[in-house]
Image (cartoon, rainbow, N blue to C red):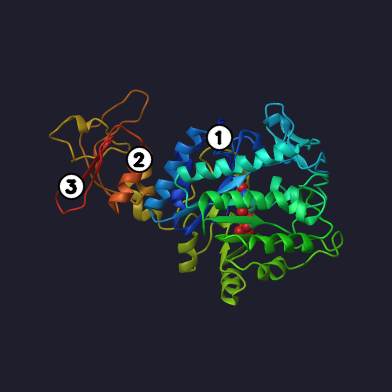
Amino acid sequence: MAPMTRTRADAAGVVGELTVRYYVQRASAGLIVTEATNISAEAQGYPMTPGIWSEAQVEAWKKVTSAVHAVGGAIVMQLWHTGRIGHSDVRGGRLPVAPSAIAIAGQQHFTPTGPKPYEVPRALTTDEVRATVEDYARAAVNAKAAGFDGVELHGAFGYLPHAFLVDGANQRTDAYGGSIENRARFVLEVMERLVGVWGEGRVGIRLSPTLAYNGMVDSDPLATFSYLIERLNALPLAYLHLMRATPDAARFPTWPRDTVATFGPLFRGNLIVNGAFDRESAEAMVASGAAQAVSFGAPFVSNPDLVRRFAEGAPLAPADPNTYYRGGAQGYADYPALHADEREPARGYWLVQATVTDPAAFGRYTAVAGPLIATYGGRVLARGDVAEVVEGSVPRRPCLIEFPSYAVARACYHYAGYQDAVALRAGAAHFDIVVVEGMAP
Ligand SMILES: Cc1cc2nc3c(=O)[nH]c(=O)nc-3n(C[C@H](O)[C@H](O)[C@H](O)COP(=O)(O)O)c2cc1C
C-alpha cells in the first residue's frame, strides 16, 4: 500500500481510533507505507497531518502498529519534511523552509482559508540543514519506539529532500548545493542516519525523478538521480520506491521518458514501483523482473481488501477524491470489504464495561468497543440480557466474542483502551485467556 496523506490526525499531530481502524482494514496489503508523517513541528506544511516527534504521537502510533501486526500485516512509516510546500498559515506564522529562497511558481497551497500562492521560503542555514538531519534521526528512533517495521524517507514530490536534489530549487553555495555530489549530500546524510538507527533491510526511500510537479525541475535528472541511486547502493536498504511519471515532452525534451526502465536497473536492491498500475500491469511488471513489487495508492482508499479483490478478480470500488483530505470518518474507514457481510453479526455493538467487577461474571463477558470488533475479525457469539446505559453513551450490553487469535484479541482490547477485561474464547466451552488492564497475560 503506497503512502497516502489522509489528514485525520488532531491539531497536535496525534492519530486516533479511526486511523487504527483504517490501517487494520488494509493490513492484508502485505506491506503498508503510512501516510507521510512530519518528523518535527518545523517539518509540517499541512494541517491535520500526523507527526512522530512527541510522546503522545508515538503512543498513538503504537496502537496502529500493534493492531496491524496482530492481524499479520507489516507497516513502515514514511518520514516527511514538507520543505517549501507549506504555508505560514499552517505554521503558526512561520515561513516554510527550503534549500534556497525560491518559491514554487504557478501553483497554490490549500490553506485552511482557501488556496493561496506559495510564499518565498526561508533558506536554511548550514547549521539548520545539519540539525534537520538530526531531526530525521530522532524521528527514526521514535518510529522504532512506536513499533514500526521500518521507515521510508519521503524523497519525492518536491518535499524537502527532493528540493535539495534538483538545481531548479537548490542554488546553495555551501556543501549542500552546487554540484550533484553536494545536492545529494542531504539525502545521503539522512539515509545514513536512518540506517544507523534501523540497521540493515529496514530503511527505504521514495523517489520521483521524472516528476516536475511542485517546481521539481532539474537541468539533468538522469545525471542527478543516477548518481544518487549509485550512492544509495552502498547502503543496506530495504528498497527503493520509485514513482513513475512521464514528463511533458514539450517542456522537458531531454528528460528520460520511462522512469522504471531508466532508473530501476541502477538500483541493486529491491525495487518497488508505483503509479497508475492495475492488477494486470502490476503482474506484468513483477513477472518481467523489472521490479520486485508494485505499490497501489488510490485503489487502497476505497478497497481495503484490494488483495482479495485482485485474487478473486472482483470489481474495484471507486474512491471519492472529495473525501481524501476532508477529515472525519466519511470516505476514510467506512469503505466496506467485499465480504463485510460475513462479519455483520458483530457490527455496531457497544459492550458493557462493568462485568469485570462481578467475580461471578468475570471472564464470561468481554468489553471492547463494538464497532471495532468486526475490524479485528471478531465474532459476537452471544449477547447478555442487561443493557447498561451510561450517560452520554449508547446502551451497552455484555457480549461474548470470538477472535481469530489471542494476539488479535489483545490488540483489539488495547485499541479499545478500556479498564475492562477481554476474554478470548479459545476452548469449546470455557475461556483459556483473560486479559485485564495492567495484568500480564
Ligand atoms: C489521497 C492521496 C494521498 C497521497 N499522499 C501521499 C503521501 O503522503 N506520500 C507519498 O509519497 N505519496 C502520496 N500519494 C501518492 C501515492 O502514494 C501514489 O504515488 C499515487 O497515488 C499513485 O499511485 P496509484 O496510481 O496506485 O494511486 C498520495 C496519493 C493519494 C491518492
Residue located at (44% from left, 58% from top): 28
What is the CA distance from the residue labelled 3 to the residue labelled 1? 39 Å
Q: Quadrant of residue 359?
A: top left
Residue found 44% across the figure and 42% down from its top: 62
Q: Is residue 328 visible?
A: yes
Q: Amino acid at mark 2?
A: His
Q: Quadrant of residue 136?
A: top right
Horizontally, residue 370 falls left or right of residue 92, namely left
Quadrant of the image containing the C terminus: top left
Distance from disc 2 to disc 3, alpha carbons, whole Å, reads 19 Å
**For mark 1, what is the residue?**
13
Q: Residue at x 31, y 38 (%)?
A: 368
Question: In this orientation, which residue lies closer to the viewer: 438 or 404?
Answer: 438
**Identity of the residue furthest to the top in this view:** 391
Q: What's the residue at 45%, 63% (across, down)?
A: 308
Residue 59 vertical placement versus 289 (above, below) = above
Pinpoint residue 363: horizontal percent, then vertical percent: 18, 40
Residue 335 percent location from the top left of the image:
49, 49
User: What secondary structure is found at the residue carrying circle 3?
Assistant: loop
Q: Which residue is mark 2?
A: 414
What SS does tag 1 mark? loop
Residue type, mark 3 in image: Phe
Vertical comparison of 66 with 390: above or below: below
* Tag 2 secondary structure: helix
Q: Which residue is denoted by mark 3 in the rendering?
A: 431
**How dense is the environment of label 2, judged by Cα within 10 Å: few (below 14), some, or many (20 and up)?**
some
x%, y% of residue 306?
50, 60
Of residues 416 and 91, which is closer to you in this image? Answer: 91
Type of amino acid under label 1: Gly
Q: Tell whether 398 sits left or right of 90.
A: left
